[in-house]
Each structure stands twice: as structure tokens, then as C-alpha cells.
Image (cartoon, helix red, strand yellow):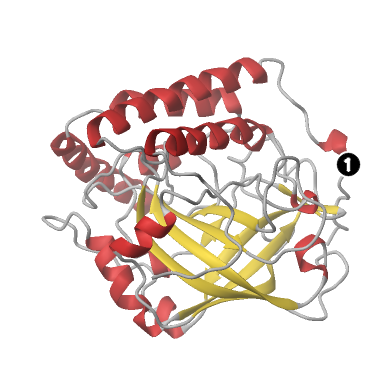
């Protein structure tokens, strides 16, 4: 196995039109936010608007990690309070019969170290999705996907439900032939699987102290692994995912947080998150455990405590875990735009929590 590649600023290759693309992304997000806030009389996130799970946990960094893994947050063993939000990716609040990729946002508290510019508080965020590949290879392609999402945000819900059913069938045919499509899944063709049984991936690359990495969160306790691959019937049950997460986290659960180091710049690119890094070249290695005690996995009161006043962003955290690549660079402005819009529209200041105290 090759040695891990050391981080250097020139590992990134900004695109010539990146600033213009970022402005157009912000315009598309504003269109989504204007549409949804007008429909609901309340501003929700421009993407990942609907929460399906909100719960507290403990993040435990393991001792005796090898030097290349004991970097940044993971340099010292210890325990940290954590907050988890599970969601789906549209910017409107759809019934769960519209089946789309699941997201998991993890906020770790009481984190010490040099902060990224404009990163408030003492938290470290990891924002993950239940698939290893990002749907777009670059910022320009991401803009095309977001424009498509903006055009469909105000479509009738019944049409989205019908389209999702067709796309799920197409995705199953494709998977039976040995393939899969991130585009089909994003548009509503994802299997309607239980969020607590899924593995989640950072998809994009990050600085990992002196090195470069991607991250993964994997369920390992029996209470979670028995849910892996389970499809949840959602016809006539618009909040089926919330109901199952609320019920099934009553047993608690344990995940492993894993790191995959970049060992080959050719086959493990930083700038193209649609390329999956080979686990044969560089396997994921466990560096921490996330433990959720028994609790309700979602409630209206918890959603009120988290969905409006708290943001999750890859740009909230330590300089040692700086987000890398074009998709992450344009995320800095777009994440801020979405949270600032919500704060202004809802007249609800957004802040970094100093403790986890869910109702």
C-alpha cells in the first residue's frame, strides 16, 4: 500500500469560471428559498429541508491511532457530546413516498484547535450522504443539477410521487444489471430504505491534518444493522421515515466513524467527488465511535429546537479538516446564504450550540 499523500495548498485546482458558477448557484438556491418560504410562510433549508431524525449522541475518539490518522480532531482520544440530524435532500417538504437520498449531519461539540475562517463556536461538522459518489464531478455540473431541482421545487406533489415510483423501478432494473445512477437516485429513484441502517459518506475530500481524506459513518450495533436495506412502505404515510426513526432509536445505536486516506492522486482525485476512491488502494479505518443512547429519534419539539436555530456546514470546524475541491469551495457561500436567509425570514438567529440539550 502506498504512503498517504501529504496535504499542500496546491493540491486544489480552482476552475476558471468558479466565482461565476458560485454566483449562479446562489441565485438558484435563492429561487428555491423564495418558492418554499412563499409556500410555507416559513423558511426551510434550500436543500435537505425535511428532518427525519434528530438525536443526541457521544463521539468517542479511539486511543492509539497511527500518526497518519491521529490528526486534527482525532489527535487525542476523548469523548465529545454530539448532535445528529438525518434528512432527505430536496429543498421542499415532501411526503416520504418521494424517495430520495438520505443525509446525515453530525455536529461534534467541545472541539479545540485552530478554526476555519468564519467558523463560529467550538464545533466540528461532518455532512454526509448515503452513497460514496457525489452526483456531479465539478461545480458547473452541480449548477445544472441545482437548476433542475429549482425548476421542480414548485411542481405538484402528486407528480413527484408518481415520478419517484417510476424512477425507483428504473433504478432497480439498473442495479439488477450491476450498475446504479446517482442522478436517478437524486431525482427520486433512490430505494426507500431505513435511514438508521445506512452507511454515510462525506463524498468530497477534506484535509486530515497533514494528509487528505474522505470520511464514512457505518452502523455497527445490532439495533442498527438489522435495519440495513429495509425498505419502508410510505404510500399514504407522508412521515413514515420520521415515525420509524422515532420508534427504532428507542433501542439506541452505535456507528463507527472511519477515515480513508488519499494515497494516489491519479485514482483518488480531490477535485472530482463523483469518482469513488478505491478501498483496495486505501481502506476505510475506524478512528471513532458514535453512540446514541435510547431516546426518541425525532419529535416536533426536537425539530423546533434544531431545524431553525442551528446550521450544519462543512465549513464549520477546524482548519485541520479544511474542505477541499470545487464542490466544497462553492459550498462555503451557498451554505451561508441558506442559513442567513432562514435567519432573516424566520427572525430566528442561528448559532453554534455549546451543549446538547434536546427536549
Q: Count the marks.
A: 1
Judging depth in this view, the residue of 196 and 186 nearest the camera is 196
Count residues near mark 1 (Cα–Cα under 10 Å), then give few for <14, some for 14-19, many for 20+. few
Identify the image quadrant of residue 235: bottom left
Where does residue 343 sit, x and y in percent of width and height?
Answer: 46, 39
Residue shown at 49% from the left, 44% from the top: 349
Residue 353 is left or right of residue 17, and the answer is: left
Above or below, comparing residue 258 to residue 99 in the picture: below
Where does residue 82 sit, x and y in percent of width and height?
Answer: 57, 68
Dot 1: what SS? Answer: loop
Where does residue 113 sit, x and y in percent of width and height?
Answer: 81, 58
Quarter of the image that includes the N terminus? bottom right
Where does residue 289 sit, x and y in percent of width and height?
Answer: 62, 76
Name the residue beneath numbered marker 1. 8
Quarter of the image that includes the C terminus? bottom left
Residue shown at 86% from the left, 50% from the top: 5
Residue shown at 69% from the left, 46% from the top: 119
Residue 95 is left or right of residue 127, and the answer is: left
Above or below, comparing residue 354 to residue 179 in the picture: below
Q: Do we see residue 177 in this rendering?
A: no
Judging depth in this view, the residue of 109 and 158 nearest the camera is 109
Identify the image quadrant of residue 112: bottom right
Amino acid at each position: 500500500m502506498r504512503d498517504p499523500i501529504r496535504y499542500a495548498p496546491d493540491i486544489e485546482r480552482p476552475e476558471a469560471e468558479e466565482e461565476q458558477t458560485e454566483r449562479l448557484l446562489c441565485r438558484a438556491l435563492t429561487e428555491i428559498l423564495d418558492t418554499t418560504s412563499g409556500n410555507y410562510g416559513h423558511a426551510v433549508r434550500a436543500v435537505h429541508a425535511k428532518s427525519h431524525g434528530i438525536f443526541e449522541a457521544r463521539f468517542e475518539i479511539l486511543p492509539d491511532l497511527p500518526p497518519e490518522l491521529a490528526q486534527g480532531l482525532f489527535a487525542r482520544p476523548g469523548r465529545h457530546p454530539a448532535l445528529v440530524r438525518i434528512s432527505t435532500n430536496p429543498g421542499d417538504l415532501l411526503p416520504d413516498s418521494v424517495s430520495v437520498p438520505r443525509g446525515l449531519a453530525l455536529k461534534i461539540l467541545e472541539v479545540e484547535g485552530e478554526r476555519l475562517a468564519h467558523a463560529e463556536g467550538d464545533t466540528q461538522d461532518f455532512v454526509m450522504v448515503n452513497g460514496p459518489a457525489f452526483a456531479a464531478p465539478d461545480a458547473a455540473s452541480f449548477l445544472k443539477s441545482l437548476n433542475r431541482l429549482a425548476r421542480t421545487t414548485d411542481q405538484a406533489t402528486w407528480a413527484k410521487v408518481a415520478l419517484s415510483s417510476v424512477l425507483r423501478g428504473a433504478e432497480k432494473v439498473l442495479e439488477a444489471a450491476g450498475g446504479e445512477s446517482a442522478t436517478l437516485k437524486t431525482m427520486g429513484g433512490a430505494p426507500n430504505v431505513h435511514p438508521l441502517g445506512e452507511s454515510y459518506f462525506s463524498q468530497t475530500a477534506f484535509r486530515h491534518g497533514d494528509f487528505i481524506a474522505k470520511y464514512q459513518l457505518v452502523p455497527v450495533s445490532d439495533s442498527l444493522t438489522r435495519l440495513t436495506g429495509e425498505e419502508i412502505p410510505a404510500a399514504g404515510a407522508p412521515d413514515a421515515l420520521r415515525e420509524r426513526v422515532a420508534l427504532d432509536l428507542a433501542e439506541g445505536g452505535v456507528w463507527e466513524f472511519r477515515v480513508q486516506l488519499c494515497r494516489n492522486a491519479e485514482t483518488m482525485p480531490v477535485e472530482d467527488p463523483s469518482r469513488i476512491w478505491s478501498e483496495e488502494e486505501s481502506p476505510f479505518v475506524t478512528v471513532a465511535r458514535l453512540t446514541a443512547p435510547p431516546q426518541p429519534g425525532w419529535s416536533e419539539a426536537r425539530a423546533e429546537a434544531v431545524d431553525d436555530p442551528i446550521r450544519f456546514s462543512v465549513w464549520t470546524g477546524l482548519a485541520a479538516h479544511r474542505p477541499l475541491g470545487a464542490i466544497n469551495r462553492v459550498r462555503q457561500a451557498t451554505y451561508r446564504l441558506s442559513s442567513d436567509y432562514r435567519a432573516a425570514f424566520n427572525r430566528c438567529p442561528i448559532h453554534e450550540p455549546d451543549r446538547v440539550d434536546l427536549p
